Image (spheres, rainbow, N blue to C red):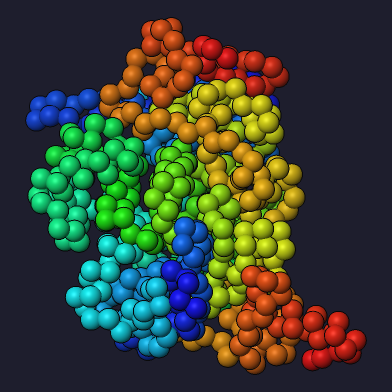
Amino acid sequence: MSGEHLVEVRNLKQYFNVRTGFFRTTPLKAVDDVSFNIGSGETLGLVGESGCGKTTVGRSILRLYEPTGGEVYFEGKLVTSDNITELRKSMQMVFQDPYSSLNPRMTVSDIIGEPLDIHRLYTTKKERKEKVLGLMELVGLNAEHATRYAHEFSGGQRQRIGIARALAVNPKFIVCDEPVSALDVSIQAQIINMFEDLQEKLRVTYLFIAHDLLVVRHISKRIAVMYLGKVVEIANSDELNDNPQHPYTLSLLSSVPIPDPKIARSRKRIVLEGDVPSPLRMPSGCPFRTRCSYATEQCAAECPALTERGAGHFVACWNK
Amino acid sequence: MSDYLLEVRDLNTSFFTDNGEVKAVNGISFTLERGKTLGIVGESGSGKSVTAYSIMQILSDTGRITSGSVLYKGDDITKWSKSKMQSFRGKHCSIIFQDPMTSLNPVFTVGNQLEEAILLHTDKSKREARDRAVEMLELVGVNEPAKRVRQYPHELSGGMRQRVMIAMALACEPDILIADEPTTALDVTIQAQILELMQDLQKKLGMAIILVTHDLGVIAELCDEIVVMYGGRICERGSVDDIFYNPKHEYTSGLLRSIPDVTGRRERLVPIAGTPINLLNLPKGCAFSSRCDKAMKICLEEVPVEFELNPGHSAACWLNMKDMLASQDGGDCE
């Protein structure tokens, strides 16, 4: 496939079989026919509400789940279960919860050093130690922290350990799954800045998954919006914020509480009716139609495809 | 001074743990007027939730109000008996919690739980209570309320459960509603529904709201007055505009600098250095001094006094004192 994209996701599908009765299982379409690509050195933000499949997309790309359908290409090469161990040297992940994603029985140097062990990235013990200390310095941890255990650290510092672990193999691509949402505001800013610095220094590419739209807008060049397992809109992040097309994006943006009282007072919220439908009982056609005020008969009959409306701005909606 | 609905005076709350006394709330005072919304902002461990629990006296076994008073219509409720407090909770003052998943009882129907509150605090009959429960669910925008009262909490979505919690809290028409991170566990579109609902209900019923949250966006949308807490103390208080456009405490301005710009300008964020303080050993001086780049000698030595800068806007920061003294006599002070 084309060479300029670092990661290409083509028609990715990830279904889980959920037991819905004694003998019956129903496929839960966590991710349904999702395609996008990420350029080298770019940050793509992936937003959506809980249960929309954004985390599953990230995990399927790294083959933490075996996808039900579709392909992922990394540097033009098809990712398969055979070459994924090798590819994980270039693709890594930072997890949401810094409290459960670090092994409590391992010291910091073991946690950060484990990827080095797995991929045999050193020849002598001294080299391993140097590499670990270098990584710790890179993420702003002190050398004396190396022998401590994860529980001795605060949330922000634990997240730094998780990031150092992801960076250990010198990856080109990192999936950041809600890396700051478990942190306090003042610590969030420290970690966001660090992500930006690391990108500049190491030229890494991020898929930045989050539900906080202000954070995503700040860090991403482009943003993809997901709803019930489908991407409904992708655009440049300023374009998406200034000129949202899909009715879901519109209400999502207007729902974000703005930390500025004057703007908050003058703004009109577009409050959506009802709840997200259960992914086990997806509506026919467009998944958003049950809450959409523009919905027509066509929306119930057929699911709109993602089509380009203006440079790089893709929308999946019949009415826009 | 009893024209305030609620007045908290020099409240101190501590938890007595195996590792020593944790001073969660250290001498805070504030007032709440009828029909107004007061926001309490702070990070985890700042004492904002403990303040709310202290007002309701629903602290865990190890926690205790060590000194200070909470006046409800001029009457000190910290002196009230257990049974009198029981009638205070729910009838005069209600609380909704962060997590709607765990704050409803899973083995009773929604209707049952709503009726319990009504039967406890009013002399309504069982039938009237059931009608009131349905009416309350309708008020908070639950569809098909007559059917919902027979359902169990697990049958409802997160947003619906939070609506039920609000219905329960408002069933006896309290004067005060304390909302402890009411939308933190919810998605943005559901959060917008709940915030809109709280604003509507306040207009309709006229209750005062104490909104406890870490989300500055929610605060900006809902509150009239704001109290900013750090390390169990109040560092700044004022109107929404005072706090957002003219912050006078280094912690408040630090918080505002560390959130991404709302207009989408991608300026680098300015985080607050360091990590939140440990309440087990509070520093001698200002709790924020170890993370403040403008800290002076006095900040490390003495706890700053709260200091009114403009009517209704005050901050506890030695820098303001220094500025003021400097402008008064033109000399310097260290």
Q: Is residue A281 left or right of residue B195?
A: left
Residue B53 appears at what percent x and percent y? 35, 71
- Tell me: residue B35, above or below residue A6: below
B78 vs A302, nearest the viewer? B78
Looking at the image, can residue B331 be seen? yes
Residue A8 appears at what percent x and percent y? 56, 26
Residue A163 appears at what percent x and percent y? 55, 55
A62 vs A232, nearest the viewer? A232
Give the residue displayed 65% in from the left and 75% down from the top. B315
Give the residue displayed 36% in from the left and 68% down from the top. A105
When asked about the image quadrant of residue B273, the answer is: bottom right
Give the residue displayed 41% in from the left and 7% down from the top. A297
Give the residue displayed 62% in from the left and 15% down from the top. A308
- Tell me: residue A222, above or below residue B295: above
Q: Is residue A233 left or right of residue B2?
A: right
Q: In which quadrant is the C terminus of chain B drawn?
A: bottom right
- Tell me: residue A164, above or below residue B51: above
A216 vs B128, nearest the viewer? B128
